[in-house]
Each structure stands twice: as structure tokens, then as C-alpha cells.
Amino acid sequence: MHSRFDRFRATPLGQQLEALIDEPGRYLEYAALSRVGVAAVAAISDDIETVFPEVAADTTARQFCGALVADLMRRHGHDVVQARGRVAGPVFSYGAVFSPRPVALPFAGVIDGLARMPDALAGLMARVPAAWRTRRPEGTGFSATEHVCHLRDLDAVFTQRIAAILAAPLPRIDSVDGTAMAAERDYQEQDPDAALASFRRGRAQLCASLRKLDAAALARCGLRDGLHRMTLEQIVRELLDHDRTHCQELEELLAELAPPAARGKGGAA
């Protein structure tokens, strides 16, 4: 999950919500709703309304629920097919709708998806008025400028991770606190157009290097945070999931920035 929720995840409410969302059997409910084109987060609406009434007034908690459900669905191989599906009830107004069934991408398809990201990001950024590029959403989250800078810098991090795995057996791969990085590097004061151009160049180089990897290289492992062994292929697939998370968050931001009359026409919760 995006590091912007790390602090909330550690709170008692965050832990309780995670236990609810990730409990055994929940995935079947999310998958069933996905097969009929309903936002997966709707599966927990009644439980949240009944047992967690404080969530209705807590924007960060609602965002956390949507992000955690999305994380679970991506782990099971589902893609977002609609960023803003309506959800009935007083807690969630919208939520992401996922593919009816898991989508198993071959590794070449993963690289193709990574290669398309700069154009997708440019399209999203083109929809953000210049005066709003540093505006953050309610609750917790990045501005459009912060998203672009974060994606640029995370590509450098993933490039380092890949190089480390190729160079040594089972290197330690530490997680990155993107929120802290954004503050330390003062993303809000950076030029998003320059960041996007840099991201485009870096992503092209990264994809070119990934296309050269063979099966033996993809099977090499790194040790995530000193605990979890991950293959190089899993690391690369994680980057694609990271891209998709930020596209979804940008869609949500665009919906929040839209004039009130336009919000009912699409977007994310």
C-alpha cells in the first residue's frame, strides 16, 4: 500500500479496519461484486456503517479503506476498470471497480505496461489546471506535482533495487517512505513538467534494461525489509502496481478538484 497510509495503518482504528478488510473470505465478496460491475469497497459498507460509525466523518479512514481493498484486489491480480463506481450508503460515495476476474500478465506485458506510464501520467497531468498542481486532496495524499516527482524518484529507487539483486545474492531491499521523501525533497516547489520529462527518460531506460533480463535473472531474490524474499520479477510487477495506484489516486484527486456540478459524472472515492 502507498506509504501515505503508514502512520494511519499503525493506529488502533487503522489496525481494526485492516483486520475487517483482510479477514478470510472477504476476497470472495470483493470478487463477486467485481463480476457484476460494482465497486469492491461496497462489500464492507454495511460493516463500516454499523461497527465503525466514526469512519463516516473521517476522510483519511475512508481513503484507507479504499486503498486497502484496492491493494488486496491487485494482489489477487485484478485491474481497475472504472476509477469511480457509485456506492450506495452513507459511508462511501464512490469506489474503484475491478476486472471481473484476475488478469495474468506475461512479463513482457508488464514491461509494456510500465512503458505506457509516462503517456498515461502526461494525460492525467494535462487535466490538472496549472493553479491546482500543488493542491492536495482532503485527508491524506499527494498533490499532482508530488505524484510526478514521487514517480520520477521511485524509478531511481527501483533501478537501484534491480541492480542490487543482479549484483549480489539476496541483498536487503528496504522500503521507502514516500511521504517523508516528498517533504525532504520539497516536491511542492519543483517543476512538474521537468519532473515528468525526467520520469519519461528514466522509465525508457529502465524498460530497455528490463527487456534484456532472462529467466535466471528474474528468479534472483532480494530480501524486502530483512524479512520477505521477493524475486526480481515480483519487484518489477510491484512497480507496475505502484504505477496503477498513483493513476488511481490522480483520478481521485481530479474528481475532488472538479467543479461540484461535474463530480457526479465520474471520478473516485
Image (cartoon, rainbow, N blue to C red):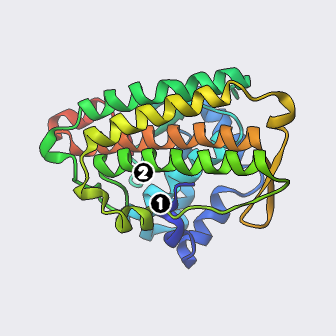
Q: Nearer the viewer, residue 177 or 69?
A: 177
Relative vertical location of residue 173 with respect to residue 200 in this rendering, above or below: below
User: Is 232 placed above or below 22 here?
Assistant: above
Task: Say which quarter of the image contains residue 109.
Answer: top right
Residue type pointed to by label 1: Gly
Seen at 61% across and 70% down, the residue is 16
Q: Quadrant of residue 106?
A: top right
Residue 225: give x, y in percent of width and height.
71, 65
Residue drawn at (56%, 61%), measured in percent from left and top? 176
Residue hosting label 2: 150
- Residue sitting farthest toward the bottom: 12
Residue to which mark 1 is pinned: 178
Left or right of 112 on screen, residue 7 = left
Nearest the camera: 61 or 112?
A: 112
Residue 263 as seen in the image, left or right of residue 7: left
Q: Earlier in the sequence, mark 1 or mark 2?
A: 2
Q: Could you tell me if the residues under marks 1 and 2 are in contact, i.e. CB atoms within 8 Å?
A: yes
Amino acid beneath label 2: His
Q: Secondary structure at mark 2?
A: helix
